[in-house]
Image: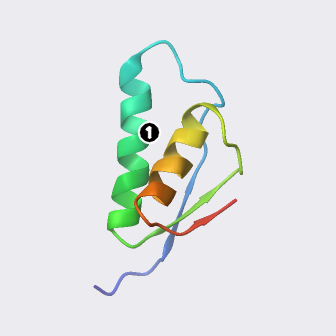
Amino acid sequence: MNRPFNSVCVFCGSRFGSKPAYRTAARALGSALAAAGLRLVYGAGDVGLMGEVANAAQDAGGDTFG
């Protein structure tokens, strides 16, 4: 696939929020980015929703930069 970008920057909270769906969505996003072959660029947080996105991307074999 030829696309104009190879990375996606994500910025989200360092807490999980009040609804479990937020955490689920964060993990789904990280997994989807990895599956699409997109590098996650993030604020290097490893806690809360930001950590969930990054950990899910890494768990799925994705490239991250933060």
33 versus 55 height, above or below: below
Q: Which residue is mark 1?
A: 26
58 versus 6 height, above or below: above
Which residue appears at 42% of the width and 15% of the height?
Answer: 19
Q: Quadrant of residue 14?
A: top right
Which residue appears at 33% of the width and 87% of the height?
Answer: 2
Q: Tag count in the figure?
A: 1
Of the 4 image quadrants, the one containing the C terminus is: bottom right
Which residue appears at 43% of the width and 81% of the height?
Answer: 4
Q: Quadrant of residue 36?
A: bottom left
The residue lying toward the viewer, choosing from 47 and 43, is 47
Q: Quadrant of residue 34?
A: bottom left
4 versus 44 height, above or below: below
Of the 4 image quadrants, the one containing the N terminus is: bottom left
The residue lying toward the viewer, choosing from 11 and 26, is 26
Q: Name the residue furthest bottom.
A: 2
Numbered disc 1: secondary structure: helix
The residue lying toward the viewer, choosing from 52 and 19, is 52
